Image: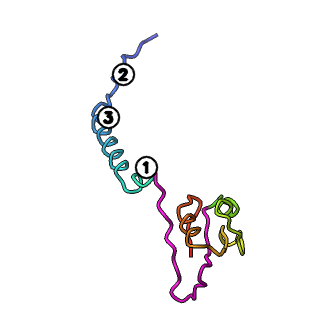
Amino acid sequence: MRMRPARKVRSNRKSLAIGLPGLLLFSAAIAMSPAAQAETTTAPRPVEVTTTPASKPIQGQYIVRLKPGASASGAVLPLGVHPLQTYKHVFNGFAARLTPAQLNRLRFQPSVAAIE
């Protein structure tokens, strides 16, 4: 039986030397991105109340769009609000009459996506 000579294994040290600093630089860039910094903030940003230019808003009535998975009852119960209408098919949300204080508290709820 004839034995083969041992094969020389090529080292990937050069590619590791280039790859590791590149990976660290990429990770640092991701950590410094505005999206990553926005996720680390602790205070919730308030949702802006918008109106459509062609619409005639009814004073004190609002349509509130909720984030997926949020419930209308979970958003309005702490405020003592009774929804005029709830929406489940086109978007998740509700319509309600809100006082300025209720509107302000609702703007800071994490389950709220938009208020019109």
Amino acid identity at mark 2: Arg
Observer-side mark, 2 or 1, equals: 1
Give the residue drawn at x 43%, y 49%.
40
Mark 3 or mark 2: whose residue is earlier in sequence? 2
> Which coloring applies here?
rainbow
Amino acid identity at mark 1: Thr
| Label disc, if present, on residue 7 of the rendered structure | 2
Rendered view: 75 above or below 91: above
Spatial CA span between label 2 and label 1: 51 Å
Mark 3 or mark 1: whose residue is earlier in sequence? 3
Q: State left or right for residue 75 relative to residue 22.
A: right
**Is 46 contained in the magenta span?**
yes
Rendered view: 83 above or below 42: below
Category of crowding for the residue at label 1, using alpha-carbon neighbours closer than 10 angstroms: few (below 14), some (14–19), many (at least 20): few
**Which residue matches tag 3?**
16
Q: Secondary structure at mark 2?
A: loop
Quarter assignment of residue 59: bottom right
Q: Secondary structure at mark 1?
A: helix
